Amino acid sequence: MITDLLNDLRDDAGLAQAIGQRPNRRVHAVLIASPWVGRSVWAVFAGRRPVPTVIVKVDADPGSHPRLRREHQALTALHRRTDLRGFVPPPVLLRSLCSRLVLVQGGLPGTPLTIRARTRLRGSVPQKEAEQQALLRWLHRLQSPATNEGFHIDADAVLRRLRRLAGNTAATRHLEARLQQTTDTWGGLTVPVVPCHGDLTAANILLHRGTVAVFDWEGGLDQRMALADLVVFLNSYARRQRTRDGWTMSREAGFRRAFGTRGWMGRLSADTFRRHLDHLGLPRDAAEGLFVTTLVELADGRIGGAHPGMSRTIWTAHLRSYTKLHATATQGPMRRDADA
């Protein structure tokens, strides 16, 4: 299929330039994903280069076409920013062929962060810290053109939504009461509204020589609160670490590992979160209130992304998990006492 498709697109100047116009140049393709019926993703290699020349997404489901169109629009906008070239895929073409929509984008060097995590049984804490700091540098680059808008935090409204989303349980009331005591640190703050990815999971990140590149922009390039992308990443990063038996953790287990009350991973997540607060000019003492606010926004479906319905369900479960974990805990990595 992919050979016929590339032949159908051979008249496109952008694709011809990306692949190369030499008639005897060898081109081969590898199917790298087929996440649902009607969707396939191919890596196309030209010549002997180990890096894919282009990535081709083909979708025969009209319901999924808007996501590919959003991705092409996002890549086009990002490509105008010279500071991001080489850190996001360049757009090549978007074209309809019969009932299929085809998106072609340039390939980038690097190893997916999920592959790195699964192929090592125990990486060192400094190694994982270096990976998170590389992601932070990329994120700060993406978010550098902050808008004049801001996300103003109404603490009372956040706590009301916390109870609605997490349920009116004893654990929720305990956490609500504790957060109420610290509203002087986080209530009334304004979080910058910045360009965001919307689905910044470890599966969408390439690591190459200490730098990060990010792909899969089907959620579009929207203006969102500046903490959401990082919370999504930290949750995904912890879940994708290889377990002793070689299996991937459940979503709940991954969240507990990322933001639980014990363990080095929770401390690392909190440290990375606080470093991002430093970059945004927000106080470290506000970490837990800002974190819970972000969870509430994700659970309430106000962040958007490529899969909003599924995302809302997942983050509602995570918010309830955090409530149970931290409602009566005497300490935790996001708590103000963790900085002591």
Image: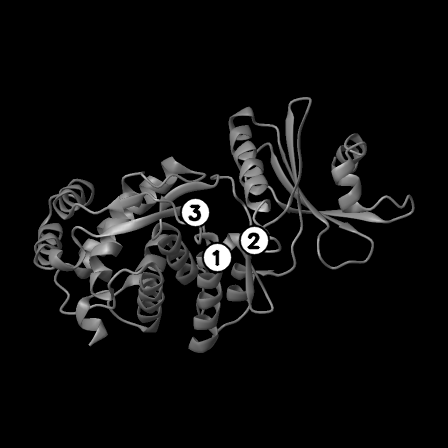
The reply to whether dot 2 and dot 1 touch (C-beta < 8 Å) is yes
Which element carries disc 3, helix, strand or loop?
strand
Which element carries disc 2, helix, strand or loop?
helix
Q: Amino acid at mark 1?
A: Arg
Look at discs 3 and 1 and give the one toward the viewer.
1
Residue 80, placed above or below residue 249: above
In this image, 140 relative to 157: left or right? right
For the residues labelled 3 and 1, the Cα–Cα distance comes to 11 Å
Neighbor class of circle 2 (other Cα within 10 Å; few <14, some 14-19, many 20+) is some
Q: Which residue is mark 3?
A: 196
Residue under the point 52% across and 52% down: 204
Percent position of residue 284, x then y = 25, 65
The reply to whether dot 2 and dot 3 touch (C-beta < 8 Å) is no
Q: Amino acid at mark 3?
A: Cys
Q: Which residue is mark 2?
A: 84
Q: Amino acid at mark 2?
A: Leu
Percent position of residue 303, x then y = 35, 41
